Image (tube, grey):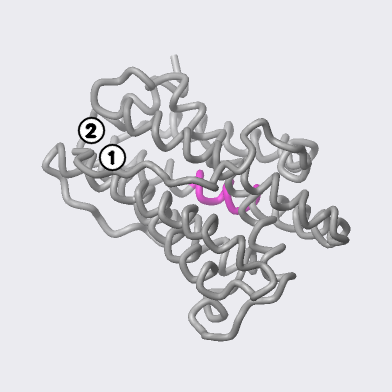
Amino acid sequence: MLSVRSLFQEILDNDESFRLFCSIAASGESQGGWENRRIAALVPHSQRDLAPKITRHGADEDKHGRIFHALMKKRGLAPVEVPPDTDYTMLLERHGIGLAHEKLRGDQPLTVQDIVTYLAHSRVTEQRAAEQMELLRRHFADHPDIGRAVRMISHDEDNHLAYCHEELLRFAYTGHGRAIQRTLRECALAEIRIYRDVSLAVMAHMGRVLGWPKTRAAALAAGIHAVYAYERAVGWRRMVSLRMPERRDALGGPGSTAANYA
């Protein structure tokens, strides 16, 4: 029977598919770490209190990248080049979601609207990350090889999502509400399309590595398209709502590290 657990177990059990999965994940996390470091360095003076939280966000992303590398190293595997069609982070940037990398590479301070855009983009993508890690935690929290990594990353993603909610609400209360809702909607509709395309690409690459029959590949593709249809109709709305989180000041303290993880 095809299930999330059986699908991921098959990927986990094969060295080639596992290192492709970890390489894709590590690349995305590392890119997110760089983006947050640059945003923290360019925060406008009026929002300097946010810089430590943005730095912490970036440090967590870097940590996740190191964890995925450690998982590969533990099995004697080296990272592989990430196929461009599976590069979720770069595809988002290429479609104008979030802050342009050209801007982040410069020295010009960001504007308050840039910070609102960054937080709205993060709120959407962290929703996706938190949901994916919750799914893995549900099935693999006690796995001897990846359980600790899944629990640690899932906890961090929940913190990131809580931070985005809290900070966006703070900006909404100071008059940015309409801009936030507009940006959230634009980001969410673009993200669900890119996520569909990346999911199809990842499954295509995994299918070639694992030798899936055409019927199985077609069933997985149909499932991905069905998820997109639901998200395009109503599911995207979960990515644009804002509520004060139970975890307040989620990125206000020191983060955990991946030291001696492997």
Left or right side of 168 for 172: right
The picture quadrant where one finds residue 228 is top right
Report x, y in % for residue 175.
88, 61
Q: Is residue 85 above or below residue 235?
A: below
Under circle 2, the secondary element is loop
Report x, y in % for residue 223.
58, 31
Report x, y in % for residue 160.
56, 45
Q: Quadrant of the C terminus?
A: top left
Q: Residue at x 77, y 42 (%)?
A: 242
Q: Amino acid at mark 1?
A: Ser
Q: Residue at x 57, y 61 (%)?
A: 92
Mark 1 and mark 2: Cα distance apart in space: 6 Å
Contact, mark 1 vs mark 2 (Cβ under 8 Å):
yes
Q: Which numbered tag is attached to residue 17?
A: 1
Q: Nearer the viewer, residue 12 or 155?
A: 155
Dot 1 alpha-carbon crowd within 10 angstroms: few under 14, some 14 to 19, many 20 or more: many
Dot 2 alpha-carbon crowd within 10 angstroms: few under 14, some 14 to 19, many 20 or more: few
Q: Nearer the viewer, residue 184 or 148?
A: 148
Report x, y in % for residue 164.
65, 48
Q: Is residue 206 above or below residue 138?
A: below
Q: Amino acid at mark 2?
A: Asn
Mark 2, residue position: 14
| Magenta-drawn segment | 192-200
